[in-house]
Image (cartoon, helix red, strand yellow):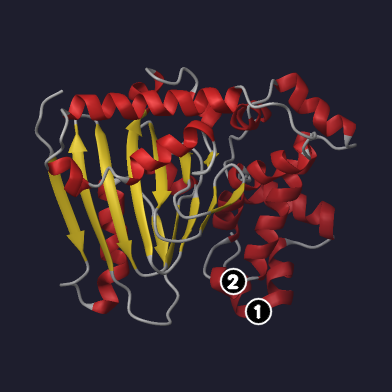
Amino acid sequence: MGSLVSMSRWSTDNVVPEHRLDYYAGALSQAIIPIYLSHRPDGPFDAHIEVASVGTLSFIRQQGSAHRCFTDTASIARNQEDSFHLVLNRASYWQVEHLGRKRCAPGDAVLVDARYPVDFDSPTGYDYLHVKLPAGWLRQWVPAPGSLAGIHFQAASGWARALTAFVASLTPDFLRSPPLPLSMIVDQLGSLLALAAHDRATLPPKTPPDRVGQIKDVMWQMCSSPTLTAADVAIAVGMPLRSFHRCFTASGMTFGRTLTDMRYTLATRMLESPLHKRLTIGEIAHRAGFCDASHLSATVRIRSGKTPTQIRRDAIGNDAAANES
């Protein structure tokens, strides 16, 4: 690996306020992955991002106003890279939904698999250090990196303490003039990830968790994908497929019925929401994970005795019903 670092910067300072959110969303999509942003309209939005590219890895610092950033099946489909993302907030408590919900303390980190939806709630005063890791690189250190996706690395425990302290120092400014060769710094990152992964694999067993509840949390993140299978979710939660189905059987449920319930709930929320009144029934079906409008309509009739148009009309009036397709 060479000694040169490629630096990139984006800032909303010179962008008119009404265009700042779109500008920053474009910057994040260019520097990291395609992503959406939303911002509470309670004050001006500002944001800054600096990226140091070291070989195939990117070290990113993000600072600015409170906002939410998230991916969905559409943005994931636009992503051409197979990557993982180690994200740490140095400044404040923060929340993330990715293969489950987590509330993280300052200095904690989460590993994100870009193949699955993620939702970050970025508080005021955030200071993110974000390392973009190509999947091929990460597999050199962690043979099954997917098993770590969604893991909450707490700064106060085991090897995660060393990992998070190290990552918190890897700012682009530091990497511009590092005291050690960049190859050593990158190898140290890989070593600490491997040690933290080993910690996770050797933790003593705890009180049996609510496995179905955990699986459902993950399914809510993934259910809008029309091609989702039980095997996909089993991999995401790190369970053998046979054990995965046994969890549902023991609770008197099935994976298929649970998935349809979630998609029906998502579709109904959109049909009843004024925010989605311009979407056609076919578009709502796709966003909720149904194959097409006919599949959604059949499911809605069976469960509610109504058509999607009737549900929409009952909730938000006749005008929106014209969007049925």
Q: Quadrant of the C terminus?
A: bottom right
User: Residue 13 at x, y = what percent?
Assistant: 19, 72
Q: Quadrant of residue 233?
A: top right
User: How far, Cα to Cα, is label 2 from label 1?
Assistant: 7 Å
Residue 33, visible in the rendered structure: no
Whether pointer 2 and pointer 1 mark residues with C-beta atoms closer than 8 Å, the reply is yes
Amino acid type shown at disc 2: Ala
Horizontal side of 4 relative to 97 (left or right) equals left
In the image, residue 130 sits, relative to residue 124, either above or below, namely above
Horizontal side of 234 relative to 82 (left or right) equals right
Q: Residue at x 11, y 26 (%)?
A: 2
Numbered circle sitting on residue 322: 2
Horizontal side of 34 relative to 14 (left or right) equals right
Q: Quadrant of residue 252?
A: top right
Secondary-structure class at tag 1: helix
Horizontal side of 251 relative to 91 (left or right) equals right
Q: Residue at x 64, y 25 (%)?
A: 231
Residue 177, visible in the rendered structure: yes
Q: Residue at x 78, y 27 (%)?
A: 245
Give the residue pinned by disc 1: 318
Amino acid type shown at disc 1: Asn
